[in-house]
């Protein structure tokens, strides 16, 4: 699952420009030429300071999102309806945590250790996808997450898999392959509720109504207010604009909701036949920023569960530790 | 601190009972091992990624969980990332192939041309010389 389209960035632009000045202009030109030719950048290659910084943050946040994203679904394993759904949910949650590890490793090739990334997550310095700061209240929520949030993540990940950094692309290739199962099992579970009893339908409709705004938030603020730099696009760190990805998602998945006789809580939502683009009521972007900065319904719980896991698991890690071992970052 | 989770198990954990900040120490997530995956007998082991583990035995266990839970896999190798010796990527140009290296390519040897020439040359003279009387 779960690379949100939005790369959270702290506003420290001044310092960046200074760092940027240190990049050797000749090396920078050669670097940009390689990317323009479609070549991949590998861990030992020269890269601009800002490229390394942005990529580290992007991949790290993606990794956190996988691990934190497993929490709202993981809580439903014991209550999943039926043996097959339980098996599928266990498999999916294991995949998500596995994706987190693949991504932490890809980020580590850029020089930041996994321990440092986990510390930044626990201290709140590093973010994860906003959607996981909402609770999964019913089983229908799990089906909406499994279908629509995974679908949104796939749109984003398929785009990122064509990016310029080799280790990230390789991790995403494997992730996208496994996501196809997540999407299908989510769709299957959602269809079962949508075509079920009136109570099941009502439960699903309620979940859709509650999740629609977080899903619209998923790809990040609209292009007109988001200051994602052209550099990131040129360096193939960001592959498509937030609105572009949101439109792709709506195009593929809104019809799949409507065909089941379900509704989405936005009367204005429609595809403009002339432009071919979807139009919708802007979600509450103030709320988006409030939630990302810790004000969502589950921010505290998510981080506390992670802290609990770190604290309670520490003795196992310590018992197995061999301090004389020399550690280096992954080679590829 | 009371906890209003929708998950009864989370409620039982008494989260946030201490406010001590948690800091994972460098090295606490152990060492890094590169993983090589063999899809079928007779095939090469191919690099697929890495795992964090305290020793090679556990690295194999984690590698199986991480890289062997789908698709075919008959064997895995692990090796510490620190033990991998690689050329510097900046020296990539030393692999540039000199195009004049036909002497070490199969296509650099034209045996059929020579065979055909030999066969062609062999036919005519004996035909003439062979006539006696």
Image (cartoon, coloured by chain):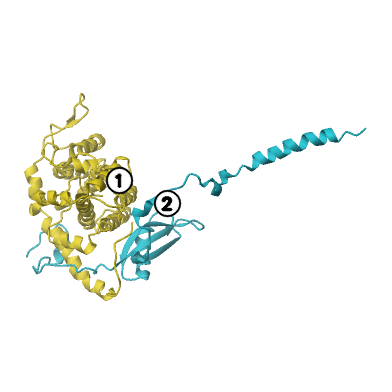
- Chain shaded cyan: B
Residue A280 image point, x, y percent? 14, 33
Q: Nearer the viewer, mark 1 or mark 2?
A: 2
Estimate the spatial distance between the alpha carbons at disc 1 and disc 2, rounded to whole Å. 27 Å
Q: Residue at x 9, y 54 (%)?
A: A294
- How many residues crowd mark 1 within 10 Å: few (<14), some (14–19), many (20+)? many
Q: Pinpoint the chain carrying mark 1.
A: A
Residue A202 quadrant: top left
Give the SS element for disc 1.
loop
**Which residue is the site of mark 1?**
A161
Nearest the viewer among A22 and A231 is A22
Q: Do pointers 1 and 2 mark residues of a single chain?
A: no
What is the total number of numbered labels drawn onto the structure image?
2
- Residues at circles 1 and 2 in contact by the CB criterion of under 8 Å: no
Give the SS element for disc 2.
helix
Q: Is residue A281 left or right of residue A191?
A: left
Q: Residue furthest top?
A: A274
Q: Is residue B31 left or right of residue B19?
A: right
Residue A190 quadrant: top left
Residue A250 image point, x, y percent? 22, 36
**Residue B67 appearing in the image:** yes
Q: Quadrant of the N terminus of chain B?
A: bottom left
Q: Pinpoint the chain carrying mark 2.
A: B
Residue B70 image point, x, y percent? 38, 55
**Which residue is the site of mark 2?**
B95
Q: Is residue A113 above or below residue A29?
A: below
Nearest the viewer among A238 and A71 is A238
Q: Is residue A290 above or below residue B123?
A: below
- Chain shaded yellow: A
């Amino acid at each position: 699952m779960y690379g949100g389209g939005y790369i959270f960035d702290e506003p420290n632009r001044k310092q960046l420009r200074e760092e940027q000045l240190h990049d050797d202009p000749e090396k920078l030109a050669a670097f940009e030429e390689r990317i323009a030719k479609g070549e991949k950048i590998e861990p030992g290659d020269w890269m601009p300071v800002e490229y390394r910084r942005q990529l580290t943050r992007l991949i790290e946040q993606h990794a956190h999102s996988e691990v934190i994203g497993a929490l709202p679904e993981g809580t439903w394993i014991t209550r999943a309806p039926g043996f097959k759904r339980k098996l599928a949910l266990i498999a999916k949650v294991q995949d998500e945590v596995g994706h987190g590890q693949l991504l932490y490793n890809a980020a580590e090739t850029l020089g930041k250790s996994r321990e440092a990334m986990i510390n930044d997550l626990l201290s709140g310095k590093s973010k994860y996808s906003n959607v996981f700061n909402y609770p999964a209240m019913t089983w229908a929520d799990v089906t909406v997450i499994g279908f629509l949030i995974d679908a949104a993540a796939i749109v984003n990940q398929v785009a990122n898999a064509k990016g310029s950094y080799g280790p990230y692309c390789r991790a995403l290739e494997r992730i996208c392959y496994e996501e196809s199962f997540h999407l299908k099992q989510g769709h299957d579970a959602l269809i079962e509720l949508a075509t079920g009893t009136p109570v099941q339908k009502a439960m699903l409709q309620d979940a859709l109504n509650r999740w629609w705004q977080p899903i619209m938030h998923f790809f990040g603020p609209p292009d007109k207010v988001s200051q994602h730099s052209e550099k990131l696009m040129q360096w193939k760190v960001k592959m498509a604009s937030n609105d572009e990805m949101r439109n792709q998602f709506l195009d593929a998945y809104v019809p799949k909701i409507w065909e089941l006789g379900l509704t989405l809580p936005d009367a204005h939502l429609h595809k403009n036949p002339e432009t071919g683009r979807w139009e919708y009521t802007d979600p509450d972007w103030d709320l988006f920023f409030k939630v990302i900065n810790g004000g969502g319904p589950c921010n505290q719980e998510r981080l506390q569960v992670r802290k609990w896991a770190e604290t309670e698991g520490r003795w196992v890690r310590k018992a197995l530790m061999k301090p004389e071992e020399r550690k280096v970052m992954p080679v590829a | 601190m009371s906890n209003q989770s929708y998950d009864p198990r989370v409620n039982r954990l008494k989260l946030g009972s201490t406010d001590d900040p948690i800091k994972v120490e460098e090295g606490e997530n152990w060492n890094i091992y590169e993983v090589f995956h063999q899809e079928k007998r007779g095939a090469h082991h191919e690099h697929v990624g890495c795992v964090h583990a305290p020793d090679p035995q556990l690295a194999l266990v984690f590698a199986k969980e991480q890289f062997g839970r789908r698709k075919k896999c008959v064997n895995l190798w692990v090796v510490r990332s620190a033990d991998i010796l690689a050329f510097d990527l900046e020296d990539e140009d030393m692999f540039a192939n000199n195009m004049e290296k036909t002497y070490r390519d199969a296509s650099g040897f034209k045996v059929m041309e020579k065979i055909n020439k030999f066969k062609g040359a062999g036919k005519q003279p004996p035909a003439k010389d062979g006539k006696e009387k």
